[in-house]
Image: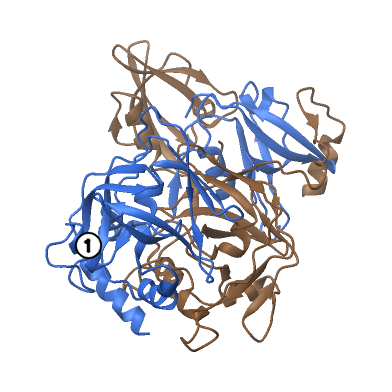
Amino acid sequence: MTTQRILIGLLATVAAATATPAQDGKKEPPKAAPVVVGMEMLPSRHFVVSAKINGEGPFRFILDTGAPITLINSKVGKQTGLSKTGGGLFGGMNSVPVKTIEIGGVTAKNSTAVVMDHPTVKAISDAFEKDGGPIVGIVGFPFFAKFAMTVDYQKQELTLTPNGYQPGDYMQDLMKNLMNAEALNKPKTVMVGALWGFEVGKEKGDEKDGVTLLKVYPGTPAAKAGLKAGDRLLTLDGRWTDTIGDATIAASLVKVGKPAELKLTRAGKELKATVTPVKGY
Amino acid sequence: MRLLLLAAVAVGCAAPLRAADPPAPKGEAKAHAVPYRLTDTKHVLVRAKLNGQGPFNFILDTGAPAVFIPKVVAKKVGLKVDGKGWGAFDTFEVEGGVTVDNARCRVEDLFQLEGMNGMGLAGVELHGVIGANVLARFKITYDFTADKLPFVPLDYNPPDPKGLSGKGGQGGLEVIGPVMKMMAGFMGIKPSFDVKAGGFLGIDAEERTGGVFVTTVIAGGPADKAGIQVGDKLDTVRTNSLDDLGDLKRALAKTNSGDQLKVEIVRDGKTRKLTVTLGGGL
């Protein structure tokens, strides 16, 4: 309960946070070779990596694919020049630029972090710091999204290859969402963005896997691939299509001209078809 | 209805279709291509069917020691939970063909997920997290320039996580849930997680000098039924006058299946007003 109230407090600060411009998803050509970095698994099954922040350290961080931000405690925030006053629980929920985050010789430049004393990080640090020193924060999305990152629990290794992905800014996206609360209350309209040439449906009370093809338009990619009205579509490009919405989302994630595999059943037999959607509206 | 349709097509035969591949031999460490999405909150979302039900939306979370699902999902899939809050799935199938044998989970209502769902911040309803006890059984590559995550099965089953000893409760496990999902309740938002397809015209068009022109009309599609023809210039769609294809996309993004879309076209120098009943096609 205490934690919950603290987080509500933090949220209010988030809304006031300033953010750097987002450059979501833009690619640059990858350059460097893969680098293998050792990790340490805590008894709690959290992974710890050593990271240098702005050339200082190394410090111990939890590697957290579930964290949309990188988090650094106020002491280290101060030590690395990220915050002049130290973050504190309510004082510093701002996204600050971090010049470099370096793990095992791999460097993410121009990243972001939030300087904050997170109660859970402190609890984990208190429990395990006797074996290797304090844990000062969490390495999250703004760092690892810049790499193709392979996590191998068995070998306790990370493999990092720069991939040119620009993570954008979580704080800014969050604010955008909060300010547009009305849109959150409405069903989302998903644009498929390509022409497949079929229509799917599902009767009320039909709980079985997949959706039924209601129409297959002649001359379209779907017709050319041999789809027929009445076929049951189970997956599209590896994604389950158990509702009309799911089929729409799956189709929307395939780009024009990219062949996608569809799994179908017809007369009880499972079939596969490859459909390449074309440009259309 | 389904049976009837299947019977109707049973006599048909389509050349490009092929029979499903035979199942891969067991024990082979072949990478599964797991479809994922990034949520609006920058979480890595995959879907899983639990005990054959779902799919449910999960975050891949190395910051969580185990799979966590809320009580309502545990109940829905008929999960048996022991006295210490652990449950075991009969089947745990991740989208993309990954099956996890003897997967176990913690059953807890995570306020972080409730908070995000309460606000609809992720843009999708979140049902749980997949943490170390299942993640550790695969070598997973997170690369957001690719549209699938390779899961390579490992011959590895990590020991159960230990709690933060001396922190009270059930070995302190409740303290460490997923490390961070931020966000708590916020008033005034009742998010909708429904998805609708934008309206379907059944045409292709291109930009030429002077505007946007129809290049293809799908026979029997909504545009065809409304009388739109190849060569027509699309002048106004909805209330937007069209300068380029982006305008067309933006106009359609405000529509759904079944909507009446007013379209002004120019054919042989004459402007005609047409109404298209938009379809639900893809």
Position of residue B177 relative to residue A110, above or below, is below
The residue closer to the viewer here, A57 or B101, is A57
- List the single residue furthest toward the bottom: B168
- List the single residue furthest toward the left: A84
Provide residue A206's location: percent of width, then percent of height.
71, 57
- Number of marks drawn: 1
- Residue drawn 16% across and 57% down? A81
- Colour for chain A in the figure: blue
Amino acid carrying mark 1 in the image: Gly
Colour style of the rendered protein structure? by chain
- List the single residue furthest toward the front: A131
The residue closer to the viewer here, B252 or A104, is A104
- Residue drawn 39% across and 28% down? A31
Provide residue B88's location: percent of width, then percent of height.
70, 72
Tell whether A220 sits left or right of B119. right
Provide residue B146's location: percent of width, then percent of height.
50, 37
Tell whether A82 sits left or right of A235. left
Tell whether A220 sits left or right of A137. right
- Residue drawn 51% across and 67% down? A42
Mark 1 packing: few (<14 Cα in 10 Å), some, or many (20+)?
Answer: many
Q: Chain of mark 1?
A: A
Position of residue B81 relative to residue A170, above or below, is below
Provide residue A241's location: percent of width, then percent of height.
63, 47
Residue A257 visible in image = yes
Classify mark 1: helix, strand or loop: helix
Position of residue B91 relative to residue A55, above or below, is below
Residue A231 visible in image = no
The residue closer to the viewer here, A19 or A249, is A19
* Residue identifier under label 1: A77
User: Quadrant of the image for the N terminus of chain A?
Assistant: bottom left
- Which of the 4 image quarters holds residue A273? top right
Chain colored brown: B
